[in-house]
Amino acid sequence: MTSRRLVGLLVLAAGIVLAAGVLMDRPFTESQASVGLELVAAGFNSPVHLVSPPDGTGRRFVVDRAGVVYIIDDEDRVLDEPFLDLRDSVVPLRPAYDERGLLGFAFHPDHADNGRFFVYYSIPPRPQAPPGFDHTSRVAEFTVSADNPNRADRGSERVVIEIDQPQFNHNAGALAFGPDGYLYIAVGDGGGANDDGPGHGPMGNAQDLNTLLGKILRIDVDGGRPYAVPPDNPLVGRAGRDEIFAWGFRNPFRMAFDRGGRHELFVADVGQNLWEEVNIVHGPGNYGWRIKEGTHWFDPSRPNDIITDGPSVGPGGEPLVDPIIEYRNRKLPGADGPGITVIGGYVYRGRALPELVGQYVFADWSKSFNRGSGVLMTAQRPATPGEKWPWQVVLELDAFVLGMGEDGDGELYVLTTDATGPVGATGQVFKIVPAGE
């Protein structure tokens, strides 16, 4: 593992093409901050997430899909010894492209006192998995080593929940503690395409309340072993799985609570062929998939057709909640969206870029599979409630964007790689800074 710091604005030699202020089809009406990227650390495999512990140490923990968590200290040095290494437990990953691996990480709100943290990772199919299923998603709790705060106690692992996955893709995997103290878990629809095929029910997994696939789960990791269900979860006392908080998701790969403002939960749900979307999950409800893709109706027999009419409610008569942000996926010929896979991000609450405070800063993986060409975007809450959030592209990158991160000060990071799969050591961590700082 190598580490280096580049002061100032990165330019072409660092593999980044800066295009500050490039406007797409929903431009802002106000002037925006010009942003740049500062290289913090390099040499990772597939960094998908960055988070800081709530302990004031200034450390940043980098979650690598390959199965390792690294620490960047407050002087931007990557520590030689990983904080946690799960490579011997993670399912073998496909080198060309994979959506499995170590995908989520969250510190317990009282981590500074109890040393607890939680991870989401992919293991080979457990014995209870249905025949032919690809793997099992595991959420587990660990504690920090008693004699070294920079090392996890590997032997402390406690399995919280396991979810069997029929296909290798659409794992989602984000973890986040809400302001209510409960753990939220993002789970994809099981993979494949169209939320259809082996391991997918007649209505698709995302609309089936008897499966945890295609959902945002909400559990109490302090109220029982392995967990308790919050009594106000929407399906408690009704048909369906009590752990479910919200449903109708395809692949909610990244999600994050706003650390300020209304403390809303922002969920980026990766679309199929036509639309990418970001939702605010205000509370329980049906967020559309596979009845809808974005704000448009979806027909699994015609996945490439734009359908402008369809049902407005789910199977139980509940209204479908539309996203706050939607943009066209550019996979199909003639599509002109900014990318093909929404990554998600954070509402900016830092100090370095005051013009961005309160805006949602997010990314897209790439414009194509052929060459890394991710983008960084910002979106602003509209003046009129209920309207879509206008957005713009502020940076174009010569790399695939795998994730974003937020440190203890509310500053944001972009995590990239040059490879489509978990191979090599081209993963880099950049901090978002003012242009020309």
Image (spheres, rainbow, N blue to C red):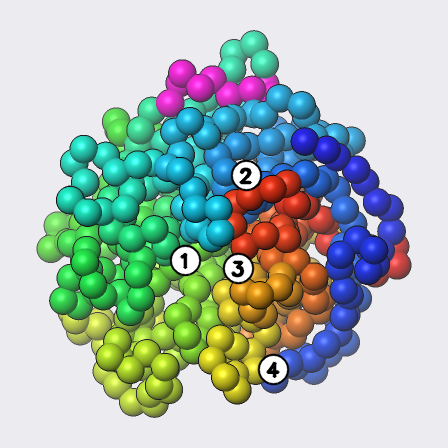
**Which mark is nearer the camera, 4 or 3?**
3
- Number of marks drawn: 4
Amino acid under disc 2: Val
Distance from disc 1 to disc 3, alpha carbons, whole Å, reads 9 Å
| Magenta segment boundaries in residue numbering | 149-157
Q: Could you tell me what secondary structure mostly forms the magenta stretch?
A: strand
Q: Distance between the residues labelled 1 and 4?
A: 23 Å
Q: Answer few, some or many: residues within 10 Å of disc 2's Cα (few below 14, many 20 plus, some between 14 and 19).
A: many
Q: Mark 4 points at which residue?
A: 26
Q: Mark 2 points at which residue?
A: 63
Residue placed under numbered mark 1 in the picture:
252
The secondary element bearing badge 2 is classed as strand
Answer with the quarter of the image where residue 46 lies. top right
Q: Residue at x 66, y 72 (%)?
A: 393
Query: Percent position (x, y) of residue 58?
Result: 69, 32
- The disc placed on residue 343 is 3
Q: How far apart are marks 2 and 4 (CA)?
A: 33 Å
